[in-house]
Amino acid sequence: MTEPAKRSVLFDPLEIGKMTIPGRIIKTATTETMSTADGFVTDELVAFYERYAEAGTPLIITGNFYTQRSGRVYNRMPGADDDNKIAGMKRMADIAHRQGSKICAQLSHAGRQVFQPAAADDPVSASAVSDKFSGIKPREMRIEEIRSFVDGFARAAERCQRAGFDAIQIHAAQGYLLSQFLTPYTNRRRDAYGGSFDNRLRILLELLRAVRERVGEGFPILIKLNGDDALPLRKGLKTQTLVEIARVLEDHGLDAVEISVGHYESGFPTIRGNFNRFFNTLLDEGVGQEYPRSKQLGMRLSKGILAAVSNRLWPHSEGFNLAYAEQFKRALHIPVICVGGFSGPEAMAEAIDTGQCDAVSIARAMIADPYLVRHLRKQEPGPQCRFCSACLAHIGTRPLDCSHPEVSAERALMLERERKLCPANAA
Ligand SMILES: Cc1cc2nc3c(=O)[nH]c(=O)nc-3n(C[C@H](O)[C@H](O)[C@H](O)COP(=O)(O)O)c2cc1C
């Protein structure tokens, strides 16, 4: 592996509200499929986070927690919906702190974007607009349901704080419920929560206020927001409006923003890469096994074309959301975190050096190599992600892991070496 361009930048501390993190490389949210069916933390989930902590990852953002059961994205998703979950969540926070990492819980509600249809009994959204990716037709949320969602979300945030998490992240990106309220294409309401910019933003502001009231002034609240909805020919949001949303949230006490892109319906701008393995994995090992037979057959017949088109439309590049992130950076005073395609130290350092963002966050390259931060710090080689996204194709059906044959073989050898170095990891 080559040397980082400016090692000091990647390991410079960063202040997010009153929290200081010891570096600029963040593990972003990745759903784990490791909880019990009722959303309780398991040993497997704690062990998953232990590796990132051992690596010295400055900030670990967990996979999404649901705040009420009706907001689940997939099965075996963890919940922060009840006080009886706090003890398990505390184990995650403790494991991160033991090695000096900070840990932030991502809180979300699927809305119409239920990745695993079996996870949703009665999907709701801002409006009853079908999701073309999953085929799910939600019903419009009633006003009292919005109130109870906001209240439940704030209570969940407080539970994270009580469990010892250092921060929470509101998931308002990638087409999940809050993103569905912001976006005119998915929000066609005629009441106080739809129509104008202010009305579509209302739920998020109420939620931010409610969370702040529960967690108090000093506790960092982050948000994940789109830099672009990537919904061509539909009424999706563009960067300028999303920057304006972030500015209003900053005025209301938000502490940092992480920039992503797209909705499920956008295709794959969120996870640009090479999709030759994706559809096979989805059908053979992922939630595709649960699709109706006709959908499975159609996908099997067209998977070659789907992969070729996806490869062409959404090729991988390092820092593929930087053009959006830098527009947020120009308008905001709070830290801007950019996710998307990062794996090498040069691109990460350059993104920060050139002022396009304050920190970078990483999903797939850290699934391939959970010790990535340590490897970068010590300038040692580690397994290199090939951005095949097969890891995403089996969420909901089996625990998160690298599914690329060569990379996962290399990863297994590395984990074996780690286990020998530290026999406690054998468990
Ligand atoms: C397996 C997997 C699970 C993911 N789960 C989440 C999640 O729970 N919450 C979220 O905001 N994004 C999730 N994402 C999206 C990532 O956080 C990230 O935005 C995206 O993968 C681009 O970053 P990367 O190029 O570093 O992978 C997931 C991505 C993958 C590959």
Image (cartoon, rainbow, N blue to C red):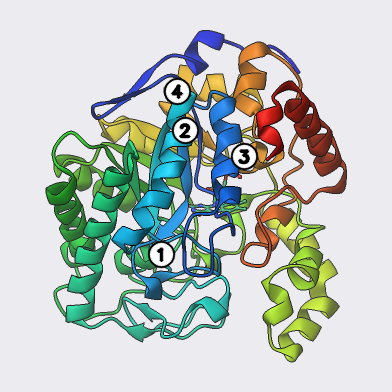
On residue 341, which mark appears? 3
Can you identify the residue that label 2 sits on? Answer: 96
> The residue under label 1 is which amino acid type?
Gly
Of the numbered discs in the image, which one, if any, rests on residue 155?
A: none
For the residues carrying marks 4 and 1, which lies nearer the camera in this image?
Answer: 4
Ligand 1 within 8 Å of the CB at mark 3? yes
Using the rendered view, name the quadrant where residue 189 is placed.
bottom left
Q: Is residue 236 left or right of residue 215?
A: right
Q: Mark 3 to mark 4: distance in Å?
A: 26 Å
> What whole-number distance in Å separates the C-alpha atoms at marks 1 and 2?
37 Å
Asked if one can make out residue 90 in the rendered structure from this viewpoint, the answer is yes
- Mark 4, residues whose alpha carbon is within 10 Å: few (<14), some, or many (≥20)? some
At label 3, counting other C-alpha atoms closer than 10 Å, the crowd grade (few under 14, some 14-19, many 20 or more) is: many
Residue 236, numbered label: 1
Q: Of the residues under marks 3 and 4, which one precedes in the sequence?
A: 4
Give the structural element (helix, strand or loop) at label 3: loop
Instruction: Give the residue pinned by disc 4.
Output: 100
Q: CA distance from mark 4 to mark 1?
A: 40 Å
